[in-house]
Amino acid sequence: MKRILFIIVFLSMGIVAGCSPTFIFGNEEAEPRSEPAINPYTVPPNFIPQAVILTALGDSLSQGVGDTENLGGYTGRIAAEIRTWQGIEGVAVENTAKRGRRSDQLLAMFQQGELTGPVAEADYLTMTIGGNDVMRIVKRDLFSLNMEAFADELILYENRFDTIFTAIRDINPNAPMIVMGIYNPFSLITDEVEEFDQIIASYNDVMQERAEQDPQACFVPVSDLFVGNKNLVYHSDFFHPNSKGYDLMTERILERMEECGLSYQE
């Protein structure tokens, strides 16, 4: 782990410096993509609401930090796609996500009842949580990193994630839920970070295993989209996706929604 110490110092400084408030996607409609998309989706006659409500939960990725096109990150882009589906008259986005949020903070919001309303009224849910849990260990143990600390935190994270998931389903048992995986931002500047690849994979395994227990949930892996920056997918803060990164995440989400049976097909 020592060989990546200066890398972590560099990236952690960038993350701390970039923690000021930024664009938050609310209920404005995201503009459609410049290129017309083929719409393979339709909804049955008994599912034609006045408006679909898409509720976003979690951290900066659900919030859309780094999206220079101001389309609301992947959440806003998914909303724009849903607006094109046959039978959908409108989509409202309730984005409760916040930059820097960890799983313990998200869990506390459920325990205090802060998210009961947004989750209860949702027709679709998106959630990204876990990246800041990993980064808390990085910043806390900056000069004495070891795998054991991440393994200990993973046990706590697994319990919190399961409790969060259960709380969501207690409030809203049926809304399709998109659970986003996390990625390794250290690959941006070096490929010699196998330890962190293992850590990220462990967190993703926890999320995927829990999501697969729910027929209305879909885990979306994205770690392969952010290996290095050959495709120019990172924002200038070297941590969050840029607009292209969110475009790729959205394409992956739509593919996975179809595979998970969460899209209405003709």
Image (cartoon, rainbow, N blue to C red):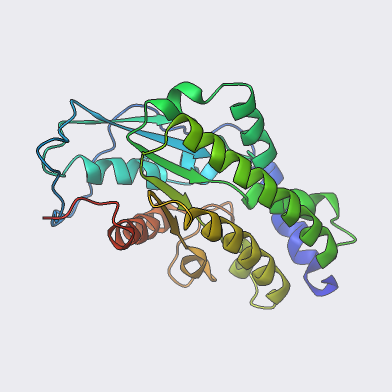
Q: Is residue 150 above or below residue 102?
A: below
Report whether 42 appears left or right of 127: left
The answer to whether one can see residue 14 in this image is no
Count the numbered circles shown.
0
| 234, 56: nearer the viewer | 56
Query: Which residue sits at x=24%, y=46%?
Result: 81
The spot of residue 91 in percent (x, y) is 25, 32
The residue furthest right is 144
Q: Position of residue 46 (x, y in %)?
A: 13, 35
Q: Nearer the viewer, residue 239 or 43?
A: 43
Left or right of 229, for residue 244: left
- Image coordinates of residue 124 in percent, x first then y, are 35, 39
Q: Quadrant of the C terminus?
A: bottom left
- Visible residue check, residue 232: yes
Q: Residue at x 20, y 39 (%)?
A: 83
The residue drawn where x is 86% and y is 54% is 141
Q: Nearer the viewer, residue 40 or 211?
A: 211
Please give the name of the residue rendered at 51% of the width and 66% of the height, measured from the top-left corner. Answer: 226
Residue 153 in the image: x percent, y percent? 77, 53
Position of the N terminus by quadrant: bottom right
Does residue 20 lie above or below 145 as drawn? Answer: above
In this orientation, which residue lies closer to the viewer: 90 or 248?
A: 90
